[in-house]
Image (cartoon, rainbow, N blue to C red):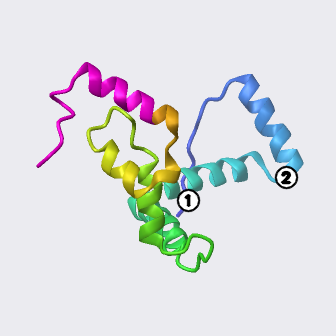
Amino acid sequence: MASRVLISLGEDRTSRLDDLAGQRGLSRSALIREAVDRLLDDSSESSDRERRLAGLRAGFGAWKNRTDIGDAVEWQRRERAGWTRPWDVDYPEVRAEFPDVFDEQDDREYEMHRARDPERYKTKL
């Protein structure tokens, strides 16, 4: 059973609602019912959960058939190596493993940091 609900809208909202109703060929009431339905659908937890799950499903395995990166683990290690900065204590080890990721400027910065704080950059035995 349908019930009537009395709502108050300002003249501006009523005018905009009438314009939209005219464009879509609907009544004011039909537009308001659509808006309420959309609000109720959007606010339901199951609907929100389903949207999130759909997004996860759409993205899951997106890289599984990539051939341009070679071994995915090796690619990831190389990407992370690029995050290593000259002031990081493990810079020499990462630099040795991925020499093409770094340049002479990085080496100069490492030496500068090492000279400032030799205790921090002691070689591990």
Between 77 and 59, the one lying in front of the other is 77
Q: Is residue 22 left or right of residue 34?
A: right
| Label 1 CA crowd tier, 10 Å (few <14, some 14–19, many 20+) | few
**Is 121 within the magenta?**
yes
Question: Which residue is disc 2 drawn over?
Answer: 24
- Residue at left offset 85%, top offset 52%: 24
Q: Is residue 110 above or below residue 22?
A: above
Q: Secondary structure at mark 2?
A: helix
Q: Is residue 22 above or below residue 41?
A: above
Between 31 and 66, the one lying in front of the other is 66
Q: Nearer the viewer, mark 2 or mark 1?
A: 2
Q: Secondary structure at mark 1?
A: loop
Q: Is residue 11 above or below residue 124?
A: above
- Residue at left offset 66%, top offset 47%: 32
Q: Is residue 65 above or below residue 86?
A: below
Quarter of the figure with residue 114 = top left
Q: Residue type at mark 2: give it.
A: Arg
Q: Which residues are magenta?
A: 107-125
